[in-house]
Amino acid sequence: MSAAQDFRQPALCRIYVDDEEVVELRPYLVEATVETSRGEAAVCTLVFDNFRLEDDSWQVQDAGVFLPWKPFRIEAHFGDYSEEVMRGYVKEVITDAPEQMGNAKVMVLCQDESLLLDREHIRRVWSTEDEAMTDGDILAEIAGSDFDTEHEAGLSNVALNQDGTSIRFLRERAEANGYELYLREGVIHFKPPQLDEDPQASIMAYMGERSNCLRINVRHDGHKPDQVALVRAAETGTELEQETFSPNLTLLGSSAADSSAMGLSPFVWQMPRPAGSSLEEARARAQAKANESAWKIVAEGELDGSLYGHVLLTHKPVGVYGIGDTYGGLYYVDRVTHVFAQAGYRQAFRLLRNATGQHTEPEGSDALAGVR
C-alpha cells in the first residue's frame, strides 16, 4: 500500500488511562477535543454520553476509569500506525444531569504534564552574584528525575528568585530569554523557536487527490514593527540610550515580510527597559519582541485528519502548498485544535510566517509527506 493510500484510512481516536486503553467506554464517547498552542499548556476535553445502570450506578463516572490525577494519553490511529496527540493527567471530572435523563453527559478535562509543576507555591533564591546559575541549569534542577529536558543554557543570572509554582516561574524565564517552553512526551523543551527542523507533512489545498486542507485563510499584516528599539537611561548623565534589534530567526521564504521592499524606513517600536532586569535580559526580551513582531503572515484553516494522515504539531515548521507563490511555502505551527467526532478527525490550525515566496517547490511524494 502506498503512502498516499495509507494516509486516507479513517483516523481513529484511542484513549489510554494508566497505560491501558479505554475500551468499554469507547462507544459512549461523543467528542474528544485537544487544544495545543505555543504559549499555553495542552488541554483535552472528553465528552461522554452517560447512562444509569440497573444497579443504579452510572456507566461513566462509576466505572473507576477517569479520576483526577490518573495518567492520560490520547492518540490518533491511522490504519497500522499511530501518533500521539498529547499526554498528561486527568484534571477534572464533571457530571451533568439535566432534566431529561437521556441527555446526561460526563466531561473529562485533562492537561499536559505541566500540571505536575503547578501544584506547589515555592519561594526560593536560585541565583546570586556569588553563585550564579543559568536558566538552563535551573530548568534541569526543577525537572529532576520526573522529566527529560531539551534545553539551552539561556541567561546567566546574578539575582533571581522564585515566588510561585515552578511552571509559572519557568514560563517567565522562557519569556525573558525569548525561548519557547512546552512539554511533549515526557520532555520539557526550553529553547528558541526551531525553524530549521525538517518540516512536517505538507498541508495541501486545491491539489486534487493530494488535497488534505478543507479551508485556509491567509492574512498579511504590514502594520507590525520591523525592528524593536530598547530605550534605557545612560550610565552617566541624563540622556537616553537606544539600541535597535532586528529579527534574527530563519526566514521561512525568499523575502522578509517587512516594509523594506516598499522603500519605507523601518517601522521601529520602542521598548522601555523592563524594571529590575539586567541589561543582558533586557536585550534578550527586545530581541524576542522583534522576532515575534516578524510574524506578519498568519494562516488559519482546517485539515481533514484522515487525509492528512498525521498529527500536526505545534513548535514545528510545515509546508503549505496550493495557495500560490507569494504565500505558499514553509510556516511555523502556532496552534492546533484536534477534534475527534462523528464527522471524523479535524485539525484546526493557526500558522505563522515571517517571509513571502518559496525557496523551492515540493517535489515527489517524500517532500509532500514531510519528515517526522
Image (tube, rainbow, N blue to C red):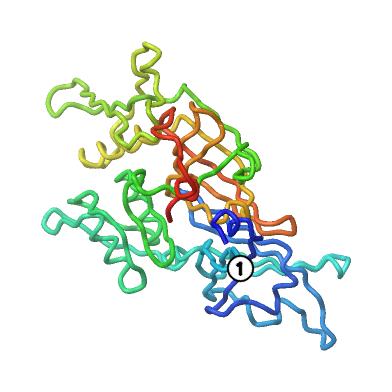
Which residue sits at x=55%, y=58%? 2
Is 363 situated left or right of 136 in this image?
right
Q: Answer above or below: position of 145 versus 305.
A: below
Question: Looking at the figure, which quarter contains the C terminus?
Answer: bottom left
Q: Residue 94: image x %, image y %?
A: 68, 68
For disc 1, the marked residue is 92
Q: Residue 275: image x %, image y %?
A: 29, 38
Image quarter of residue 268: top left
Image quarter of residue 207: top right
Q: Residues within 10 Å of mark 1 (few under 14, many from 20)?
A: some
Q: Residue 292: image x %, image y %?
A: 39, 36
Q: Secondary structure at mark 1?
A: strand
Which residue sits at x=77%, y=79%? 58
Is 325 situated left or right of 149 in this image?
right
Q: Answer above or below: position of 202 versus 188.
A: above
Which residue sits at x=77%, y=69%? 49
Which residue sits at x=76%, y=79%? 59
Q: Answer above or below: position of 365 versus 324.
A: below
Q: Tell me which amino acid carries mark 1.
A: Glu
Question: Looking at the figure, which quarter contains the N terminus?
Answer: bottom right
Outermost residue toward the front in this view: 1
Outermost residue toward the bottom in this view: 55
Q: Answer above or below: position of 236 versus 372.
A: above
